[in-house]
Image (spheres, rainbow, N blue to C red):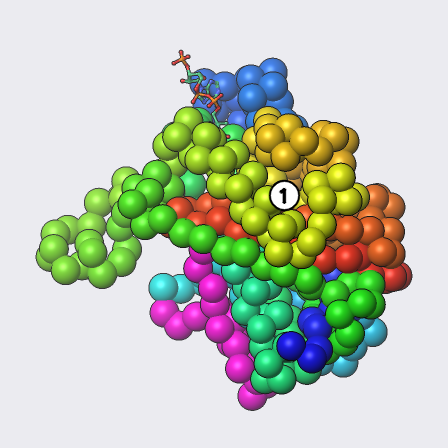
Amino acid sequence: MNRAAVIAGVGGFVPPRVVTNDELAQRLDTSDTWIRSRTGIAQRHVVEPGTTTSDLAAEAGRRALKNAGADGADLVIVATTTPDRPCPATAPTVATRIGLTDVPAYDVAAVCSGFVYALQAGTAAVTSGFAERVLVIGAESFSTILDPSDRTTSVIFGDGAGAVLLRAGEHDEPGAVRDVHLGSDGAMADLITVRGGGAEERSRGEVPRQEDRYFRMEGKSVFFAAVRRMAESSRTVLARTGWEVADVDRLVGHQANTRILHAVAEQLGLPPERAVLNIDRVGNTSAASIPLALADAMADGLLRAGDRVLLTAFGGGATWGSATLTWPDLPVG
Ligand code: UT7
């Protein structure tokens, strides 16, 4: 590998409407105290009717390009669990909205690991010479697939988008993606799922059931699998990079649950304060979670040029993955 993929810009966007825990407690058997103590979430953002994933993705993408001072990209990858439609992919719509016509654009479906999967694809596109600049976006309007009567999922997920622009650069420059590790286990497909709306349901020829259109999660089983897989994957990618755990300045994990992220840090032997957290403000935004956390951490001054950053995620599939990178010198704003 002669060249590296380097982060040239970061952008985040959340829809303006905020839903607090108290607002949810007005219609669900839950409480602010339970949600905060079990998840770390205080509020989440949700789309208004008519706003879709491509709206959020396009705005985050524009912001990443602006942050990079770039006038375009030659590949767009959108990681999402909530595409605008089952067909076609959302990425071409996003690319066109940003003004990037004629460029290749495709979706990645790995639920909450989607951004790390898309980052791997974007990195490979740059290092192979296929693309010079790749816009990697994670975007979700997750509220559109939640069962409003299900307190176990409604309190957790939120909407938003985050994006990074990758450009060709050198391995030793700040911002270079060092290594990516990915994994999956299809035997866990039922733990995080939307059963209906796909070929499985259609092939049975049954009348679609509304309840099968909603997202379902076996929270407890997912919790333990998430901690185990994120910790294992983190160790693997750190070993590939040649970094010790103590070398990691910032752990930017998928914002699934504050307790999960602290448990991952503990299993790795990393001080919990090195974990970046924005879940209190945005909830679990699935594929958007890591790039949104990066954008918020930048705005909060938590990422400095040269910081060694570990990304890690676990999501439906099951899928998981981790990446190492150094942080670039980027303007905030
Ligand atoms: O993004 C992909 C990856 N996703 C994740 O990693 C999510 C992983 N899972 C989790 O974060 C946690 O399992 C949850 C936050 C979903 C649930 O937390 P928990 O500590 O595992 O709670 P639990 O499911 O064991 O439920 C404890 C109690 C139960 O009541 P009983 O049986 O003890 O009487 C639940 O019915 O809490 C109850 N409960 C609630 N109570 C108030 C479940 N949801 C709620 C709620 N409000 N929203």
Task: Say above or below: 238 vs 67.
Answer: above
User: Looking at the rendering, which quadrant does residue 220 occupy?
Assistant: top left
Q: Is residue 163 left or right of residue 84?
A: right
Q: Is residue 182 above or below residue 39?
A: below
Q: Specify the quadrant of the image occupied by residue 261.
A: top right
Q: Position of residue 18 (x, y in %)?
A: 65, 39
Q: Position of residue 278 (x, y in %)?
A: 70, 39
Q: Which residues are magenta?
A: 87-112
As drawn, is 260 to the left or to the right of 188?
Answer: right
Give the x, y percent position of residue 12.
70, 55
Residue projecting furthest to the left: 205
For the point 83% across and 74% down, the residue is 69
Q: Nearer the viewer, residue 206 or 48?
A: 206
Question: Which quarter of the figure has residue 62?
Answer: bottom right
Please give left or right for residue 116 compared with residue 296 in the image. left
Which image quarter holds the N terminus?
bottom right
Return the residue at label 1.
253
Indicate the amino acid at tag 1: Gly
Residue 80 on the magenta span: no
- Residue placed most toward the observer, 167 or 136: 167
Residue 211 visible in the current orientation = yes
Residue lying at 29% horizontally and 45% vertically, measured from the top left: 187
